[in-house]
Amino acid sequence: MPAATIVEPFREESTQPGFRHEAVLYNGQGEFVEFASRFVRDAVAAGYPTFVVVSATKIEALHSELQDEADDVLFADMAQVGRNPGLLLTAWEAFIEEHRGDGLPLRGIGELVWPGRNAAQLAECHIQEALANIAFGTAVDMWVLCPYDISAMSADVIEGAFRTHRYLVDNGIATISRHYDSATELSDLVNTEFPPAPSTAASLSFATTDDFGRLLDRYLGVAGFADRQRAAFIEAAIGVAALAIDHSAGTHSALIWVASDDAVLEIGDIGEIDDPFAGRRHPHAGDRPGHALWIANQVCELVQIRNTCRGTAARMHIRHDVTDPLVQGLGDSSELGTHWIEVHQAIGMVAVQLNTTGQRALVAMRGLAYTTGVGLDDLAAAVIDRRLRFPADR
């Protein structure tokens, strides 16, 4: 396959303000660097703000290729920003908000799908791609390339890209996808049953959040989860369990099991969730489902919502044996009051703002907290509410 180049046969459409969501099929890192560097160079030359969210390896390769031109680009490691696909929308919206008053078109590259994603993660990646078309639509003048490595992806994954991206680049030629039907794809993905839980799943019967918390703590303790990780997951899971309790009286049931490196918790009948962005955007006051799912997304590797024949259900995945360096770096919880989950989310947002790592973002936040006398939890709340933004020269 020849190197994928950006060809523009739809000039009359691309010059109209709006969201151009384009899947680029490529074969190996060499082709990726060729088309991505060309796209970025064109954007930088035109003075367009550009956000590139790909793997750390590809960021390094692009820096090497672009040299000084890379200084005008905001880079973020997808393994951090989009590890949980439900967190990625926040990063794109922060980039858009930063440049809202510039009056310039925006450019971006985001590789959400990579080899090693499991089936559950891939489903959420396709949901995120479909939601992007709704979130941005005609309201944002932004052209985003979503690279897909055909040398490492299954046919099913590529076909999903055809359905969620209006534009495709294949063999160096840009076309409109005849399979594009983002709304139907989104509906098919969320209005379906979860795959069956394994026969080894444990059932947790509860009538109150206290009952639920005790049962979940006991299971995770036996499964070998560290105290702090266990506490975070329980706090998030209780919020989702409370939705089920509020929705209907009586005894409720949850399932939990360990699969590969993840523990998976399924809570059924949590009440109707009308907002497809619930948990993906910072919730407004009084939005209990949005708040519960937002917290869950900050803590979990993955959060899945499905409208099943038995009502709306949630699955929450937490990685078993991976130590989060940000959690380690937070140290004594007394520094954070009762809001350390929000601090963790704010670290991710500041990392994007400063184009740096999570650890360095935490250092910057602690420095500002010290110099201003503001608690780290209060500072985090200001970041999340967008009352505070860290400039690059902080």
Image: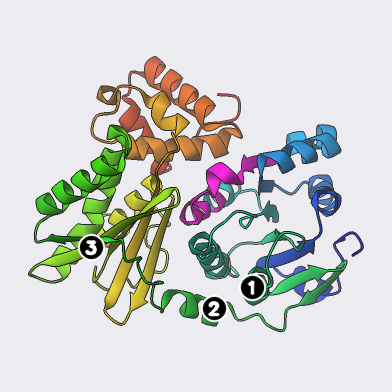
Q: Amino acid at mark 3?
A: Ala
Q: Are marks 2 and 1 in contact (CB under 8 Å)?
A: no
**At label 2, which amino acid type do we have?**
Glu
Mark 2 or 3 closer to N-term? Answer: 2
Element type at mark 2: helix
- Above-or-below relation of 381 to 289: above
**Type of the residue with mark 1:** Asp
According to the picture, the residue beneath numbered tag 3 turns out to be 254
91 in the magenta segment? yes
**Numbered tag placed on residue 185 in the rendering:** 2
What residue is shown at x 10% (from left), y 50% (from top)?
210
Percent x, y of residue 123: 52, 67
Residue drawn 46% across the image and 27% down it: 362
Separation of residues labelled 2 and 3 (CA atoms)? 28 Å
Q: How is the image coloured?
A: rainbow
Q: Residue furthest top?
A: 371
Helix, strand or loop: magenta stretch: helix
Q: Is residue 299 left or right of residue 354?
A: left
Q: CB atoms at circles 2 and 3 under 8 Å apart?
A: no
Few, some or many residues within 10 Å of mark 1 (<14, 14–19, 20+)? few
Give how far across and how far down residue 280 sits, in percent: 43, 57
Front label number (2 vs 3): 3
Pick whichever, 244 or 367, lies toward us.
244
Q: Give the magenta part as a residue range.
A: 73-92
| Residue at point 78%, 41% (across, down) | 62
Element type where label 1 sits in the image: helix
Q: CA distance from mark 2 to mark 1?
A: 13 Å
Residue at the front extreme, as displayed: 199
Query: Is 293 covered by the magenta stretch?
Result: no
Residue that label 1 marks? 156
Helix, strand or loop under label 3: strand
In this rendering, position of residue 336 left or right of residue 177: left
